[in-house]
Amino acid sequence: MNIKNKIAIVTGAGQGIGSAIGLKLAEYGADVVVADIDIEKARSTSEQISRKHGVRSLAMKVDVTSLDQTKKMVEDAIRQLGGLDILVNNVGWDQAQKFWETSPDFWDKVIDINYRGPLNCCFSAIHHMIEQQSGKIVSIASDAGRVGSSGETVYSGCKGGVIAMTKSLAREVARYKINVNSVCPGPTDTPGHIEGTTPKLREALKRAIPFGRVATGEEIANAVLFFASPLSDFVTGQVLSVSGGLTMVD
């Protein structure tokens, strides 16, 4: 599982699952770029990474909906840390509501963050990875993109798109020894989960999950670590659900 001296970018790493991923990759030796639209949260995670694990870490303010900004993120990572080996597309956003009560402005925001964001990041990183003939791309999708989710129609469509993008890009770049995979979290104990659900719904989710609880951010990060490590060198185009058994479909 050793990824010592590898250089990783994790988007949306200021808190929640992204922060857990950054810390997990650093624990196993990677230098980490903590990219987030909230620079103060990014700095907090970055400082924690360096303090706990003694690796290099950079905090960057990045809006992934801007291709110019994701290009600069990759360029700065390469210039300041010396390369890019791992890209984790983690950033995401949604507000659960009935589809017929949403608006085109809401659709645009959800699509820009959850689908265009990963597209921008992959496009910005892929040229460097092709040139060096190696790389690991891991995108955080969602079980909502595999089986649907009430109140999350637009978000589910975006995450389904990320899954399809993962498979297609994996086919295109396998010849360059680049692995592209996706992790699909189920309900996870993050600030977004707490804010987006009622206590009644959280209890109902726990009852529906065979393990009787939601995931921790670290448990999602463990799956990302597998895809970022040499253990997955012959695995590409795959989708791993981390949901405690909530969804069990092909």
Image (cartoon, helix red, strand yellow):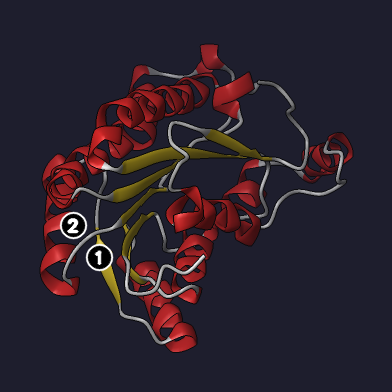
In the image, what residue type sits under mark 1?
Met
In this picture, residue 128 sits left or right of residue 40: left
Tag of residue 60: 1
Tag of residue 205: none
Name the residue at 58% across, 30% down. Answer: 96
| Residue 209, percent from left and from top | 82, 38
In the image, what residue type sits under mark 2?
Met
| Residue 105, percent from left and from top | 33, 24
In this picture, residue 67 sits left or right of residue 191: left
Whether 91 is drawn above or below 236: the answer is below
Name the residue at 17% across, 43% down. Answer: 130
Q: Is residue 97 visible?
A: no
Q: Quick one: label 1 or label 2, which is nearer the N terminus? A: 1
Query: Is the C-beta separation of discs 1 and 2 under 8 Å?
Result: yes
In this picture, residue 18 sits left or right of residue 75: right
The quarter of the picture where the C terminus appears is top right
Name the residue at 39% across, 30% down. Answer: 166
**Dot 1 surroundings within 10 Å: few (below 14), some, or many (20 or more)?**
many
Whether 122 is drawn above or below 101: the answer is below
Whether 189 is drawn above or below 181: the answer is below
**Dot 2 surroundings within 10 Å: few (below 14), some, or many (20 or more)?**
many
Judging from the image, what secondary structure is the residue with disc 1 in? strand
| Residue 201, percent from left and from top | 78, 37
Q: How many numbered marks does the figure carry?
A: 2
Tag of residue 73: 2
Q: Nearer the viewer, mark 1 or mark 2?
A: 2
Cα distance between the residues tagged 1 and 2: 7 Å
Whether 15 is drawn above or below 98: the answer is below
Name the residue at 30% across, 34% down. Answer: 174
